[in-house]
Amino acid sequence: MGVKLTDEADILFIRRPQDGAPVGSVTVDGPDEVRAAVARARGAQQGWASLELAHRVRLLGEFRHVIARGAEEIAARIVAETGKPEVEALTEVTTVVSLCRYFERRALRLLGPRRVGSGWLQWKRSTILQEPYGVVGVIAPWNYPFILAAEPALTALFAGNGVVLKPSERAPFTGAILEELLTETDLPTRLIQVVQGGAETGSHLVASGIDRLHFTGSPAAGRQVLAAAAPRLLPVSLELGGKDPALVLSDADLDRAARGIAFGAFFNAGQTCLATERVFVESSVYESFLRRLIRFTSELRAGSGGEAEVGPLTTPEQLAIVEEQLADAVERGARVLCGGHRIDPASNVFLPTILADVNERMRVMREETFGPLLPVVEVADEDEAVRRANAHPMGLFASVWTGDPERGRALASRLRGGGVSVNDTLSHWAVPALPMGGVDESGFSRVRGDEGLLAFSRSRVLLENRLDLAREPWWFPYRPGDRRLVRAILAWEGERGIRRVSRALGALLGRGET
Ligand code: NAD
């Protein structure tokens, strides 16, 4: 099931993860096709960047309407390619549309010319301008095939760039829809180009002469992309995997914690970079939390039909990883408290699974799972929970569950990563103003929020004179008084209070000179 790349012809065959029914096939693009796509996007980008920012923002508002009106068609493609429940597919479209709306409100302020103070150079006028990179390459994974293609692509367009998108080889039709919908707007039709294929096409894109690259995927592929980009000094942003911890403290509302953690772990069948993949519970509430978690997890409807809450794993490889990690954990002494197998041997729906008696020697605690396995660990106290949560090299997101907001904030500040939710999981993805990204093996960039929008443009400086002086005081030729002037500025910038004035004046008058 999933995708088969034939040896003879470079064609991707896509099948529905639910039942293996064919979805369609696409031709893989080679280096020449990728370079041609970059050239087309570059041609369109030049006109796009020369439009007034307000005009660009208005056109992108139209694009938002077109995307929102195409939601059913987009969701149908996502469901066909990933197998996820339709409501989760529609959530992808909603998230993209709401980010677009946020950028429409913020773009003029963030991307327009910004006047800043000139420090002690009071006769100068200093302005910061944001300029596009040119053509941005976007390489996307399959787990949120619309969000992770459309969000960086739209962000790049707001900043004045053109885009060449390479969707995942598992979800080419969802990726292609962005280029199709563009033709229903007044934006330049070639501004988004989609190229198809797997890692090889991705590497052609890295080498194609693009001006910036945004990559979302696994740490292993992220390393390869970064290495390939290095000789060209191509600016790259990396959004990589996660192994997010949840910390359940003794004063938590255990019903909410168990429901929230089940949602964080099993949304999209666990195939989420921000999925809760490790739970650390204070020993005084361990048993009562676990009872609730097992109850809520066992109630989830797993299957391939329209009513399912937990759908199939999208790829056979992903299913194999889940089964291998489970077998490894059980062999090393883990107990399966619920789930632990497919709904039937021919299906790729794997039941949401809770594991106890786990430790860090097990693969399920060390490696990203990206599936519905949730290990739960009993810890003595919050210090042990923080230590074990932070010990993992990935640092994407975390959650803390407590009845005490102060304690929640204090713990949040001790956890490594791109952010922490207190008494919640995943909801921050619905807040477009919040930047998203990780640390260490989870990557280093930020998308979404003001930081995410600025990241797709370069700052550029404009310095002008407000006074027309015949020469600047520090220009050649150097004169005897120059040293005094520099010492006065040093005192002015380096001292504070009354000393600042007296030292600066003293320096100007030559006091203390040898
Ligand atoms: P992947 O790394 O296998 O592939 C991601 C994309 O990169 C695909 O389009 C693939 O064709 C391409 N690719 C792979 N190797 C390449 C190379 N050497 N050069 C150029 N392109 C290459 O990941 P995946 O299996 O599609 O997605 C799952 C991974 O993505 C998980 O690790 C998950 O945590 C991560 N992810 C991260 C985020 C985030 O925002 N941090 C979001 C979603 C998924």
Image (cartoon, helix red, strand yellow):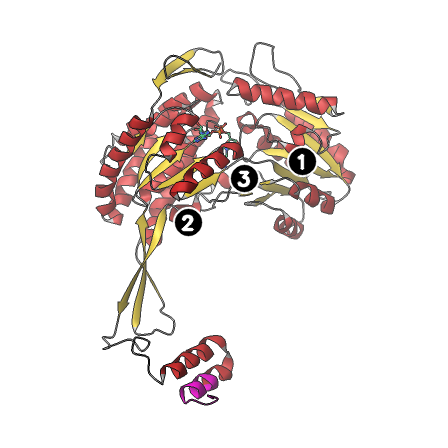
Question: Which of the marked residues, 1 or 3, is nearer the chain's N terminus?
Answer: 1
Using residue 96 as the reference point, say whether residue 290 is left or right of it. right
Q: Where is residue 315 in the image (x, y as percent from the top left)?
A: 51, 19
Respond yes or no on whether mark 3 lies under 8 Å from ligand 1: yes
Which residue bears the numbered disc 3? Answer: 442
Q: Quadrant of residue 393?
A: top right
Total count of labels: 3
Q: Can residue 423 be seen in this view?
A: no
* Rendered image: mark on residue 450: 2
Instruction: Name the mark on residue 279.
Output: 1
- Within the magenta stretch, is there residue 513? yes
Sequence order check, earlier mark of 2 and 3? 3
Camera sees residue 161: yes
Q: Tag 3: Cα neighbours inside 10 Å, few (<14), some, or many (≥20)?
A: many
For label 1, the SS is: strand
Over which residues does the magenta segment extend? Answer: 502-514
Q: Earlier in the sequence, mark 2 or mark 1?
A: 1
**Closer to the camera in the image, 286 or 358:** 358
The quadrant holding residue 183 is: top left
User: Relative to 178, is 385 on the left or the right?
Assistant: right
